[in-house]
Image: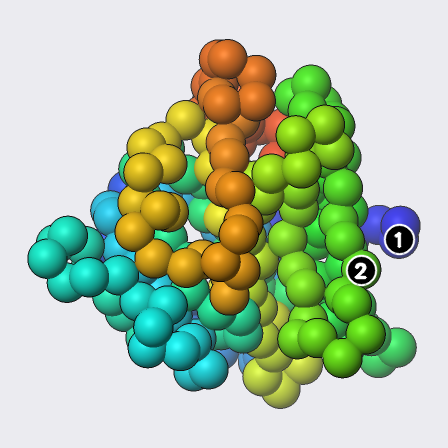
Amino acid sequence: MRERPLTLIQDDLVDYEKAMERMAALVEERQEDARPDTLWLLSHPSVFTVGKRTPTEHLPDPSHGIPVMQTGRGGQLTYHGPGQLVGYLIVKLRADEGVVDYIREVELRLVEALGELGIAAERRDTPPGSELLTGVWTKETKRKIVSIGMRASRAVTSHGFALNVDGDLTPWDLAIPCGMPDVDMTSVARERAQASMDETRQVVAKAFEATPTE
């Protein structure tokens, strides 16, 4: 894997709509070379986000009270909430790579981070004829621990990954995540019996060669 140092921004809980506004501004800055490649680590209050192709039958029942937001990323429905580490990646793609190439790099870096946390993990190849399969699964229990959805505009990526650390996993059962009716979502806490958000942030930042400059 080639070196790709990133600038690190860190926040705690940020409203999803406000985060989208800031991310758009960061993307514009990167497109104009007004900022370096950036990793923004944060969490969101409880929200489901859906891609343009998410089927209606995959959505949660409104009676559960968790808002559903349309998003411009690739992929299907996902859940964000407290105890989940979200990473938005604002990165200018190299001339010899596309967004799918970079997604594969993101998967491998997260596999490395989870290994540092004591969880053996893997990415999976997309089955022939299927929609792009992204994310990271645990090797032993075969559960999905990271969701990934990204896009690129004018060669700059946006959106990113969601790593379940120590939050409530119940909302995942209220809808069909990632377009996979049979997926079993998991977290660092579920796999390791204990988890630290601070430790996870540090390990993930290291895996992405990300250091704070602001």
Is residue 16 among what the camera can see?
A: no
- The amino acid type, in three-letter code, at marker 2 is Asp
Q: Quadrant of residue 49?
A: bottom left
Q: Which residue is labeled 1 in the image? A: 2
Q: How many marks?
A: 2
**Lateral position of residue 142 relative to residue 17, left or right:** right
**Lateral position of residue 147 relative to residue 135, left or right:** left
**Lateral position of residue 189 relative to residue 205, left or right:** left
Classify 10 Å Cα crowding around label 2: few (below 14), some (14-19), many (20 and above): few
Q: Earlier in the sequence, mark 1 or mark 2?
A: 1
Picture coordinates of residue 172, whole percent (x, y): 37, 47
Q: What residue sits 70% from the left and 75% below the top? A: 130
Q: Quadrant of residue 116?
A: top right
- The amino acid type, in three-letter code, at marker 1 is Arg
Q: Which mark is residue 213?
A: none
Q: Pick whichever, 203 or 83, lies toward us.
A: 83
Figure check: 97 above or below 85:
below
Is residue 147 among what the camera can see?
A: yes
Picture coordinates of residue 152, whole percent (x, y): 61, 78
The residue mark sitting in front, 1 or 2, is: 2
Label 2: element kind: loop
Q: What residue sits 57% from the left and 22% below the top? A: 191
Q: Which mark is residue 125?
A: 2
